[in-house]
Image (cartoon, helix red, strand yellow):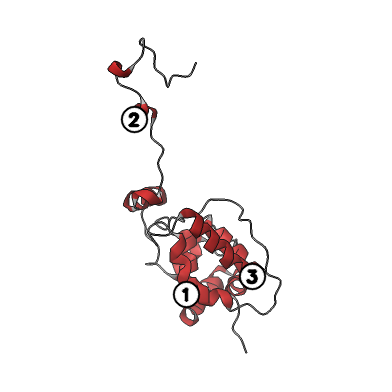
């Protein structure tokens, strides 16, 4: 008998009627499959910054059945898609690998990965509060916006492109022609 898919596991926990039951079920599921923590951390830890464009991902939905276990074996590669995860992969290569991953797993699992990339878990009853009660030391207590800013600071410069400011581009006074700023909007 094959094990349940990742999305199927989360869906069963989400469908439980009581918050305490969801907390216990989440703990039990993680005991059986510790890789579920990667999904939870990817969705709720502000220090994990996905190095993929936000929004809808253009991929073809897999139409082969019985691929529930595929994401279980691919979870270990999710580090490739976060800031600082793999310094030599270009943005285009990361996006290509992510699309290939989505096209090789069950549609429900693909939707789950697309959601966590955008820092959401598509199960309304598995909230950050449920996760914090199930695993009190898993997620940092720090302000998420401050934590995300710190993660961006630690990232390699090439991983987080920053456009120069106007002040950085503004020419010096001796470079001005006839006192006009060539960058000024006319």
> Which residue occupies 57% across, 59% down?
115
Does label 3 or label 2 sit earlier along the sequence?
Answer: 3
- Element assignment for label 2: helix
> Which residue occupies 67% across, 63% down?
60
Residue 172 position in % (x across, y down): 30, 21
State whether residue 107 appears in this view. Answer: yes
Q: Are marks 1 and 3 in contact (CB under 8 Å)?
A: no
The nearer-to-camera label among 1 and 3 is 1
Q: Nearer the viewer, residue 94 or 44?
A: 94
Label 1, label 3: how many angstroms apart (C-alpha)? 21 Å
Residue indicated by mark 3: 15
- Mark 3 Cα-neighbour bin, 10 Å: few <14, some 14–19, many ≥20: few
> Which residue occupies 39% across, 13% down?
180
Reply above or below: 78 against 180: below
Residue indicated by mark 2: 168
- Mark 2 Cα-neighbour bin, 10 Å: few <14, some 14–19, many ≥20: few
> Which residue occupies 50% across, 15% down?
186
Q: Nearer the viewer, residue 66 or 127?
A: 66
Q: Quadrant of residue 90?
A: bottom left
The answer to whether residue 143 is left or right of residue 126 is left
- Element assignment for label 1: loop
Residue 96 position in % (x across, y down): 54, 60
Q: Are marks 3 and 2 in contact (CB under 8 Å)?
A: no
Check the image and name the residue furthest to the top: 178
Q: Are marks 1 and 2 in contact (CB under 8 Å)?
A: no
- Quarter of the image with the N terminus is bottom right
The nearer-to-camera label among 3 and 2 is 2
The nearer-to-camera label among 1 and 2 is 2
Q: Nearer the viewer, residue 5 or 176?
A: 176
- Element assignment for label 3: loop
Name the disc covering residue 35, or none: 1
Reply above or below: 76 against 98: below
């Amino acid at each position: 008998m094959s094990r349940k898919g990742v999305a199927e596991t989360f869906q069963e926990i989400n469908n439980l009627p009581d918050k305490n039951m969801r907390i216990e079920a989440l703990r039990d599921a993680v005991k059986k499959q510790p890789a579920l923590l990667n999904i939870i951390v990817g969705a709720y830890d502000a220090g994990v910054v996905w190095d993929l464009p936000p929004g809808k991902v253009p991929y073809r939905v897999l139409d082969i059945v019985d691929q529930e276990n595929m994401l279980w074996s691919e979870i270990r590669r999710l580090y490739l898609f976060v800031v600082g995860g793999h310094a030599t992969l270009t943005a285009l290569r990361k996006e290509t690998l992510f699309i290939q991953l989505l096209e090789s797993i069950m549609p429900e699992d693909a939707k789950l990965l697309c959601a966590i990339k955008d820092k959401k878990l598509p199960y309304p009853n598995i909230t950050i509060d449920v996760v914090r009660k199930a695993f009190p030391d898993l997620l940092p207590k720090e302000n998420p916006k401050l934590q995300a800013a710190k993660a961006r600071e630690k990232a390699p410069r090439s991983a987080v492109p920053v456009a120069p400011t106007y002040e950085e581009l503004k020419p010096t006074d001796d470079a001005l022609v006839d006192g006009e700023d060539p960058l000024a909007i006319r």
